[in-house]
Amino acid sequence: MTDTSSGSGTDGPAQAPPDLHDRLGHAIKRAEQALIGEKTRVLRTVDLTVPQYVALLVLQQSTTGLSGAQLARACMVTPQTMTTVLANLEHKGLITRETSSVHRKVLVATLTRSGRTLTRKADTLARAVEQRLADALDTTEQAQLRHLLERSTAALRDTDPTPARAARHPEEPR
Amino acid sequence: MTDTSSGSGTDGPAQAPPDLHDRLGHAIKRAEQALIGEKTRVLRTVDLTVPQYVALLVLQQSTTGLSGAQLARACMVTPQTMTTVLANLEHKGLITRETSSVHRKVLVATLTRSGRTLTRKADTLARAVEQRLADALDTTEQAQLRHLLERSTAALRDTDPTPARAARHPEEPR
DNA sequence: GGCACAGTGTCAGGCCACTGATATAACGTA
DNA sequence: TACGTTATATCAGTGGCCTGACACTGTGCC
């Protein structure tokens, strides 16, 4: 598979994979896919999906508990998506949700005892994957990669013709 | 709330939780998310999803048409996923599927006339997004980024304890 | 008081992606 | 011929993610 050494020696865009493998975005996609694939694989041993793990991790780093909307912003997904993730976590007994004392509409999620334990175990597994990535590059290269990725992200976001992005990620109520 | 009062003088985004934004994998994830988000946005103007566009693009680059399994491998998804994508494309009249002359079980997908037209239009839009990414980096940086990403991808894949990956992506029959 | 507005939570519908299981077609070999 | 293997296609189920729509709470403004 991936017959990258397609015939002619010129490194230019020959014609075998004319347009797909030479696009920079494709390299990003493959790296992300490899990363999420590995995390999915190791997290399956503790019966967690990646989004579930991320939500638990954010919750663990909060002392007071978080609302669904706050979690959605932290995990960079829509509130509707977070609703389903939280429903699955609650069904497993890893979190509880109680109405806020200041906001009768708001449901504050907090980790249960077993949720806290499982989160620590899952984080160990996920960190190991992240470590494999870090081990492949020295510190200079890591900084370089991070810098290039951040500039790429900014380039894709900044040419935003519609200022509607604020609506999708409203700021904290404060 | 986000005021973690992290008084440390680091100029980084102070509101970041201690363990999430400093992971290298998170930078990859955000770049991929920005990329796919932009592509999704521009492709919506031609009523296509990103996976649909990718399948069409691969099909366009093939002269003879491709089977569902071949498309699945090229797009790096499972055959089951490709089945649903192809069903949606066929329903829109962008492709046709006919039983292969050499393999009565195989359904060969080919672009229709309108499918070919729409693919060209969609590719123009998608290329523009990719171009914004390329414009943000000079050629040296592009090569650097690609190289670092490829090494990252390899690092995540190579420590594969089970040689079962071959089963998920069997080689071409040829 | 009445009313718009922002923030929150949820349902409905649709697409994508995976695992697991089933059915069929062609090819190999005994 | 019978059998197993390989490759294919598809169904069923789960989960995540999105858009669109709706309902409710709280605040501020008139």
Image (cartoon, coloured by chain):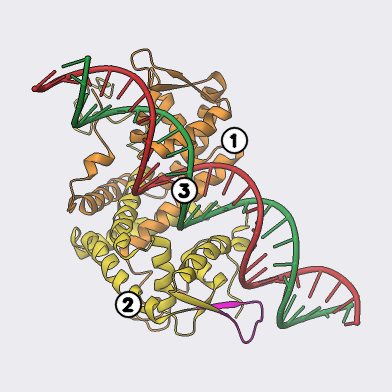
Chain colours: A orange, B yellow, C green, D red
Q: Amino acid at mark 3?
A: Ile
What chain letter is assigned to the residue under label 2? A
Tell me which numbered mark, 3 or 1, is placed earlier along the sequence.
Answer: 3
Q: Is residue A53 visible?
A: no
Same chain under badges 3 and 1? The reply is: yes
Q: Position of residue C26 (x, y in %)?
A: 71, 82
Judging by the rendered image, the residue that carries numbered circle 2 is: A13
In three-dimensional space, the C-alpha distance between marks 3 and 1, rounded to whole angstroms, equals: 16 Å
Q: In the image, is D28 to the left or to the right of B60?
A: left
- Residue B58, quarter of picture: bottom left
Judging by the rendered image, the residue that carries numbered circle 3 is: A36
Q: Are marks 2 and 3 in contact (CB under 8 Å)?
A: no
Span colored in magenta: B98-109
Judging by the rendered image, the residue that carries numbered circle 1 is: A46
User: Which of the pair A99/B64 is nearer the observer?
Assistant: A99
Q: Position of residue B11 (x, y in %)?
A: 18, 32
Q: In the image, is A40 to the left or to the right of A79?
A: right
Q: Amino acid at mark 1?
A: Val
Q: Amino acid at mark 2?
A: Pro
